[in-house]
Image: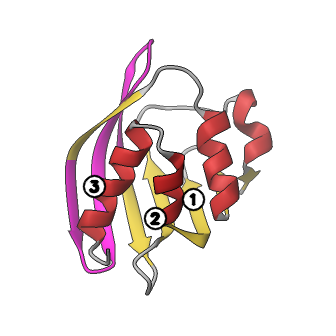
Amino acid sequence: MNDAHQVLVAYWAAAESRDWDTLAGLLAEQVVYEAPQARERVRGRAAYLRFNVEGFPGDWHLNVERIVGEGRHAASWVEFSDASDGYPGVCFFDLDEDGRIARITDFWPTPAELPASRAHLVERY
């Protein structure tokens, strides 16, 4: 799969279903995730998977509102919801030459600080 739009459709479906093996297959080994609002950065596939599994426990869901992509770049508008509330987010993705996700940059408009429960999973910048 080399088209960024198709990769994102598969990425969000795997995240929503907690299919971590499929998600891992979509990521480059040296993927970099950044969330500028909380200044979170996660480097590497294993660390990013751990960040998702441990950092977001509980019953949460993702609804994809829109994906726009071309070639090796794409953006998505998603709604993350948990038991307490819903949060819209805009996420940008870059693929490497093998069609795997090499960079993820998330923007969540709702003001947020780094939760203490995730502090050990990220590096601050």
Q: Quadrant of the N terminus?
A: bottom left
Q: Is residue 38 above or below residue 7?
A: above
Closer to the camera: disc 3 or disc 1? 3
Mark 1 closeness class: few <14, some 14–19, many ≥20 residues within 10 Å: many
Assess whether residue 92 is covered by the magenta stretch: no
- Circles 1 and 2, Cβ within 8 Å, touching? The answer is no
Secondary structure at numbered mark 1: strand
Is residue 69 shown in magenta? yes
Q: Which of the 4 image quadrants contains residue 75?
A: bottom left
What mark, if any, has residue 9 been given in the picture?
A: 3
Residue 2 percent across, percent down from the top left: 31, 78
Q: Is residue 5 above or below residue 90?
A: below
Q: Between disc 2 and disc 3, whose residue precedes?
A: 3
Determine the CA span between mark 2 and mark 3: 11 Å
Q: Give the residue type that dot 1 points to.
A: Tyr
Which residue bears the numbered disc 1? 33
Q: CA distance from mark 3 to mark 1?
A: 18 Å
Q: Nearer the viewer, residue 56 or 125?
A: 56
In the image, which residues are magenta? 66-89
Q: Would residue 3 appear left or right of 20 to someone viewing this image?
A: left
Asked whether the residues under the numbered discs 2 and 3 touch, taking CB atoms below 8 Å apart as contact, a structural biologist would say no
Q: Residues within 10 Å of mark 3 (few under 14, many from 20)?
A: some
Q: Residues within 10 Å of mark 2 (few under 14, many from 20)?
A: many
Q: Position of residue 61 (x, y in %)?
A: 38, 29
Say which label, 3 or 1, has the lower sequence index. 3
Find residue 118 and report its horizontal and vertical position in percent: 71, 36
Q: Position of residue 68 (x, y in %)?
A: 20, 62
Residue 26, label in figure: 2
47, 103: nearer the viewer = 47
Vertical position of residue 36 compared to residue 102: above or below: above
Asked if one can make out residue 90 in the rendered structure from this viewpoint, the answer is no
